[in-house]
Image (cartoon, rainbow, N blue to C red):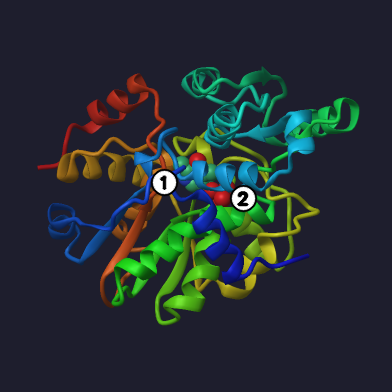
Amino acid sequence: MGRIHISDIEAAQTRIKGHVVRTPLLSARPLSRALSCEVRLKPEFLQETGSFKLRGASNAMLSLDAATRARGVVTASSGNHGPALACAATRLGVASTICLSEMVPENKIANVRANGGTPRVEGRDYDVSLRICMGLVRDEGLHLVHPFDDPDVAAGAGTVGLELAEDARDLDCVLVPLSGGGLLAGIATALKARSPQTRVIGVSMERGASMVASWKAGRPVEVQEEDTIADALGGGIGLDNQWTFETVRDLVDDCVTVTEDQIKDAIRLIFATQGFMVEGAGAVGVAALMCGKVTPDGPAACVLSGRNIAHQAFWDVIQEKGLPA
Ligand SMILES: *Cc1c(COP(=O)(O)O)cnc(C)c1O
């Protein structure tokens, strides 16, 4: 197992400058009032493909030499890394194949095509689509850009943490949506170097939280993937995890989970107070504050990691209960 270092994240920041949006840290007064604590928002849904994943994908693509680029790249995705890799590859004139399971919503498959990638939809869950992807690496010589277990991808995601440290000196905690842990490992590495007093907290959905189960077990474990409104957080961390588990185990202060209803409440509250449409995975941090799983002792930052929810699914969530007053 290995660790990324702050120097990798600094190098990523220089490399991806101009290729991704340098997002602000927003003070969110209406949301803060509703939650009775000071909340700031990192709007990663503003990235071109609608999620922070463009940071890691851009860092990985820009790090490849010409011979590797010529082979083409491949990945497996629960829905946001695929379009991000397709976008970063297409910009460099590189072909990309994106393996997606039958659980991935249609809007995310369309998002791969819209970004110039070739989707390959096969397999019942993320872990099967990753096996199909590894077959293409072996048989067709495509270069793998793993969605999280890759030092360049995690370092690219870690630039979110560098920006948080640049923009705020007084954060008590940062709430980070957690699946494979590239985003959390990257942010934790950046913040423990630049803002060690800030607590770094991972948040997953209760249904199929593989890193949280692994974190509790003290080693990577397998978890059954389930349908969830936070579909971008589905999939396992890999029993052979190399780059994220150890960092999460050693640097992260806490990991918590939230229920489907709590995530939907957070989607509604973020829209009602701030007017932002975020997907389930992007709302879990706010959900953890809302239900009291995390109680800050000072300003809290939530990473709103993505907005790629099908419009119909979004309206269904809004209409289920209506907007909070
Ligand atoms: C991928 C993703 C995450 C989780 O990132 P990991 O690096 O896999 O932990 C969170 N939110 C959204 C919107 C994502 O697409």
Residue 124: x, y in percent? 69, 25
Of tags 2 and 1, the one toward the viewer is 2
Q: Quadrant of the N terminus?
A: bottom right
Disc assigned to residue 267: none
The answer as to whether callout 1 falls within 8 Å of ligand 1 is yes
Q: In this image, 59 relative to 259: left or right? A: right
Q: Hey, what amino acid is under mark 2? A: Val
Quadrant in the picture for residue 155 = bottom right
Q: In the image as oriented, which residue stretches furthest toward the bottom?
A: 197
Instruction: Tell me the crowding category of disc 1: few under 14, some 14 to 19, or many 20 or more residues within 10 angstroms, Cα based.
Output: many
User: In this rendering, does residue 206 appear at all?
Assistant: no
Q: Residue at x 78, y 37 (%)?
A: 68
- Residues at marks 2 and 1, CA–CA distance in whole angstroms: 15 Å
Q: Earlier in the sequence, mark 2 or mark 1?
A: 2
Q: In this image, 277 relative to 147: left or right? A: left
Q: Quadrant of the C terminus?
A: top left
Secondary structure at numbered mark 2: helix
Q: Is residue 297 above or below residue 216?
A: below
Q: In the image as oriented, which residue stretches furthest toward the right?
A: 139
Residue 288: x, y in percent? 36, 57
> Which residue in the structure is indicated by mark 2?
153
Q: Residue at x 56, y 20 (%)?
A: 116
Residue 246: x, y in percent? 69, 67
Secondary structure at numbered mark 1: loop
The answer as to whether callout 2 falls within 8 Å of ligand 1 is yes
User: In this rendering, does residue 10 appear at all?
Assistant: yes
Q: Hey, what amino acid is under mark 1? A: Ser
> Which residue in the structure is indicated by mark 1?
305
Quadrant in the picture for residue 4 = bottom right
Q: Residue at x 50, y 63 (%)?
A: 187
Q: In this image, 139 relative to 282: left or right? A: right
